[in-house]
Each structure stands twice: as C-alpha cells, then as structure tokens.
Amino acid sequence: MRRITMAAAGAIFALSLAACSGSGAGSTDDESTGAPADTGDLTIGVAMPTQESERWIADGDAVKSGLEKAGYKVDLQYANNDIPTQQQQIDQMITKGADLLILASIDGTALSNQLQSAADNDIPVIAYDRLIRDSENVDFYVTFDNYKVGVQQATSLLVGLGLLKADGSKGDAAGPFNIELFAGSLDDNNAHFFFKGAMDTLQPYIDDKTLVVKSDQTKIEQVATLRWLQETAQKRMEDLLTSTYSDGSKVQGVLSPYDGLSRGIITALQNAGYGPGIDAGMPIVTGQDAEIASVKLINDGVQYSTIFKDTRKLADQAVTSAQAFLAGDKPEANDTESYDNGVKVVPSFLLDSDIVYKDNIQSLLIDSGYWSADEVASGQAS
Ligand code: GAL
C-alpha cells in the first residue's frame, strides 16, 4: 500500500489518500500520520434548479450536509429556474476551481458548453435526478427509476378509480371514466420517462374505452407543463373544464406527474365547484415528490396519491458517487442501459420509489422520519 504525506494538496491528494485506505475520500485516515483525512481543500459545486419547490430545497440541504460531513467544501447554488443563471453559476464553479460538479439541470439540453469546460479541466460531472443530454461529458447519473415512477402514478390513478386494487388485482369498478393527462417540462428528460411509464400503463384502458381522455389531448407535447409551474397547470385545467366539460359531464381522474401541478389542478377543480374532497366529487388526482402541502391534502382526502422519492437516499448516493470519483474510482452503477443522453448511455444508479396513499402516510413518511405527524397535520415543513 502506498504511503503519502499530508503535504499533498488538491485532487491528487484526495486520489492518493483514498487509494491508500481503500475507502471513500471523505472517510479516510492518513495511515502515515494517523491524522484525519483533510478533504477540506476539495470543493464540490452543486447546482440545483429552483427554491420554488420544496423538494429541491431538501435535495440541496441533504447533498450539502452529506458532502460537508464527508469533509468537502460545498458551493451550492440555486438558479430560480432560469437557464442563463444556471449556466453562469456552473461557469463560475469551474472558474473558482471546483473539483467535482453535481448538477440538477433546468433544461437538460442547455449545459453542453459548461460540461465541455468541466471536461477540459478534468472535473467529473454527476447528473443529479435529471439527465443532462447531448454531451459526452456526463460521467455518472444518480436518480430514481423514472419509468417506474410513471407506472406508479398511473397505477395509483387506476386504484383510485377502482379499476385496480392496491395489490394490483382487478378492481370492482367498470368505468368508463373521463380522465385528463398532464406531463412535466419537455426540456426535462424525466418528464418523458414519467409520461411513457404512465401511458404504457393507461393505454390498454384507453384502447378498450374504460378510460376516456375527453379532451383528446394525449400527446406529451399537448399536455406538457413548461418548467413544471403550478399556475400553468391550473390554467390548463381551467381551460379544459371550459372547453371540454361545460356540457355537464365530469372529469373523474387526472394524471398529474408532480405535486405542485396537482395543487394547481385541484385549485382549478375546486374553483369550478368540484369537491372540496374526493368524497364530494373531487376527481382522483395523482402526484409526485410527497411535498408536505400535498401530503396534507392526501391526509385530508383531497389529493389521492403521490410518489415518495426519498431525497435523503438520492443525496447519499450522490455523495458516495462523488467520493468514488475523487478517490480515482468509478462509482457503482446499477443501470447501464436506460439513460441514453443522445450521445452516450450514461452509467446510472437508480433508486426505488413508493406510492403514497392516505393509509400509508404513517408507515412511509412519518415512521421513516421524512415528515412528522405535526407537519402532515399542518401542511408545513417545520
Ligand atoms: C423532476 C423531478 C420530479 C419533480 C419535477 C419538478 O425532474 O424528477 O421529482 O421534482 O422535476 O420539480
């Protein structure tokens, strides 16, 4: 085993140090001195899309604290969902000498220049949650199984309508049911995976007319929501109610791929006289992210479901992958096929997600410490 001295600095220092101990750069002791590893010279740039949504705040906090615990300096930036701002922030991270980048993109196709300059400076890049497209300079991708998230969203819609039981067996309802579909931002690769997973699940029911998309808007381009904005979804739901349901017919289910959109959709429905809750005619509305405001709505019987993606686990995975790179290793991938970014298939680590219904809020979210019972009751993070 190679011995090194604490005098070494920067990336070379971290590389040698980790090679010496055989574990991650953040957890090593220098065996020649017995002193704790000094990874404090290494800075990791973390770019997050927006603070408008609670999940990205949680992600940013968790990644930052995980990296700091591992001994790194962290430069965490949020970009207000503005693409030029995010580009500038990443440029600056590179100029300031970041040793590694963890990036959750706004527009997955808009970072090619930044990634080229990272590669020119030998800075490894980890795409966080959202794939960065059209660049060979993405070294790794940590995310959830996004196709499966879409399957889960559609499954919960079918369960809510009574077409399936929660265990996946056939439900008692026969339909037909009127539904409407929403998708996320087209420049977010995830939006396509969510929608594909959902549509593969719903299509057989649409084909046999158990489900009727009354607006006839079934293509992702027709149902997408730029930047995942709540007010955009609210507006589209209002427009759908006017254009398609002013003949007295009712919409009974809405596929929504994200809690922020779900809340906009629910507001539009309530303003039009639906609900307030499911037992008073609110359609089955799905979601994603287990945002606290939506978990409360589920607990109150207003929103039907969400998908829980434990951002703590995603942050841990990002930290582990960063440590591997800085130790001169390759992070462990569990998927080397699904995420073709247009230039190459990016090695990925995919995490699992769960469907949240009212009756498993306790076991999934409260028992795991993700939200407290008080937060669920108030709908606010404390
Ligand atoms: C996606 C992400 C979802 C949701 C959405 C809107 O990229 O995977 O969990 O947060 O963005 O922020």
Image (tube, helix red, strand yellow):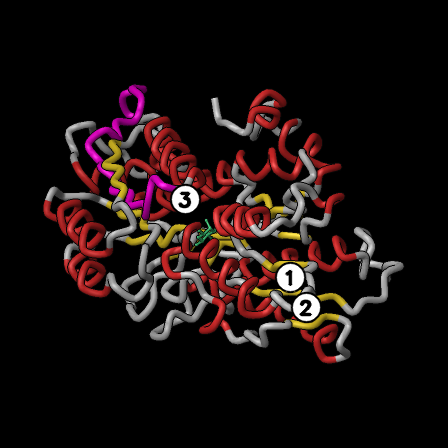
Indicate whether 220 appears above or below 382. below
Question: Which quarter of the rendered picture does the N terminus lie within?
Answer: top left
Residue 165 in the figure: left or right of residue 23: right
- For image coordinates 59% across by 69% down, the residue present is 244
Give whichever of discs 2 and 3 has the lower sequence position.
2
Cα distance in 3D space between marks 1 and 2: 6 Å
Taken as a whole, is the magenta stretch helix, strand or loop?
A: loop
CB contact under 8 Å: marks 1 and 2: yes
- Front residue of 224/282: it is 282
Q: Nearer the viewer, mark 2 or mark 3?
A: 2
- For image coordinates 31% across by 22% down, the residue present is 36
- For image coordinates 27% across by 21% down, the residue present is 33
Query: Pointer 2: residues within 10 angstroms few (<14), some, or many (20+)?
Result: some
Secondary structure of the residue carrying numbered label 1: helix
- Callout 1 amino acid: Val
- Callout 3 amino acid: Ala
Q: Kindly identify which residue carries mark 1.
A: 151
Residue 9 in the figure: left or right of residue 186: left
Query: Pointer 1: residues within 10 angstroms few (<14), some, or many (20+)?
Result: many
Q: Kindly identify which residue carries mark 2.
A: 201
Q: Kindly identify which residue carries mark 3.
A: 318
In the image, the segment drawn in magenta is: 32-52
- Is 37 a magenta residue? yes
